[in-house]
Image: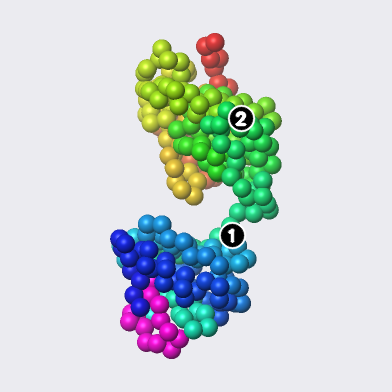
Amino acid sequence: MPCVLDGDTAHRTATALRTALVGKPTVGFSAPTLSGPTPVAGRVIEQVHIYGRHLEIVWDDGLTLHTQHRFTGSWRLYRVGEHWHKPTKQLRVCIEVADWVAVCFNAPVVETFRQFDRHRHPGSGGLGPDLLHPNANLGDCVRRILDYADPSATIAEVLLDQHVASGVGNVYRCEALWDIGLSPFATAGSISEDDARKLVQTIARMMRAGITNRKSPFLSAESHDHNGLSVYGRNGQRCEICGDTIRVKRIGEMHRLLYWCAECQARGDQRIAPTPPLGLERVMDPHPAAALFLAELPWRREYDYHAPDQYRGPRARPA
């Protein structure tokens, strides 16, 4: 039977796949374009979820198959031995149980991942405290940052992990990191307890202020410039503290836009060394645009020889 993920047929797709697959051990699995670990034969399928044009199938060992279908992908169910209605070259996933074969055709995204557990995230994989709540355990958020399972992850990525703190959005992470003068590229393993505490407290303050002051939750009520935003959405403009150009870059698995001021937020930047090597002279174009380009090259991680000014710490902020 056809199961095309389009409109209300998405719900019928999930229902059909649940009926055919849930509670049954996997007999066979193949996915030519799979990114991630392969499900093990014998593992029982426990859940089927669908949201929009995304479908997830979960096994009893925590492995999750995610397929994104956009406008080309579809799922079909066949009885074992039944002739397929599409050529095998369009096959993206084939899951076989005792009496059914579920086939996904032409999905552009096919990947597997492990569900969150205590070995990957603190707090047994549960959501972090909701910082909007007045009684939220901020100390728990601090601990989750300091004990983050991937010490090499940037603090910008860590803040969007809902297992660290619930509800933190892109605007708040950018503004809070700027507010305390911390580089978004500082790694979780390098963050001090003091910085983690300041960061959590700042985000909580901003989020709670946003409830009562929706127009400008980030600065004082008297300041209405840029809707109270200091870096978010202001790429290419001047930082009002140091005058440097605000930058933007896509980072992380979701490619969210990150805004920051390299001058004010040099502290903790793991991409550069704190001091230049002795005796080194400038040998290339010192223009700021050239320096920005060179700083992003993968082999220039030790020191940006053409922009030594970025090693100065953030300037003093007004009281």
Could you say where residue 110 lies in the image, as x and y percent from the top left?
45, 65
Residue beneath the point at 51% across and 36% down: 168
Categorize mark 2 by other alpha carbons within 10 Å: few (<14), some (14-19), many (20+): few
| Colouring chosen for the image of the structure | rainbow
- Magenta stretch: give its range: 75-87
How many numbered badges does the structure rendering display? 2
> Is residue 270 in view from this perspective?
no
Q: Which residue is mark 2?
A: 135
Q: Quadrant of residue 257?
A: top left
Question: What secondary structure is marked by label 1?
Answer: strand
Categorize mark 1 by other alpha carbons within 10 Å: few (<14), some (14-19), many (20+): some
Is residue 80 in the magenta section? Answer: yes
Residue beneath the point at 52% across and 80% down: 97
Residue beneath the point at 48% across and 40% down: 296
Is residue 79 in the magenta section? Answer: yes
Question: What secondary structure is marked by label 2?
Answer: loop
Could you say where residue 71 lies in the image, as x and y percent from the top left?
30, 62
Q: Quadrant of residue 86?
A: bottom left
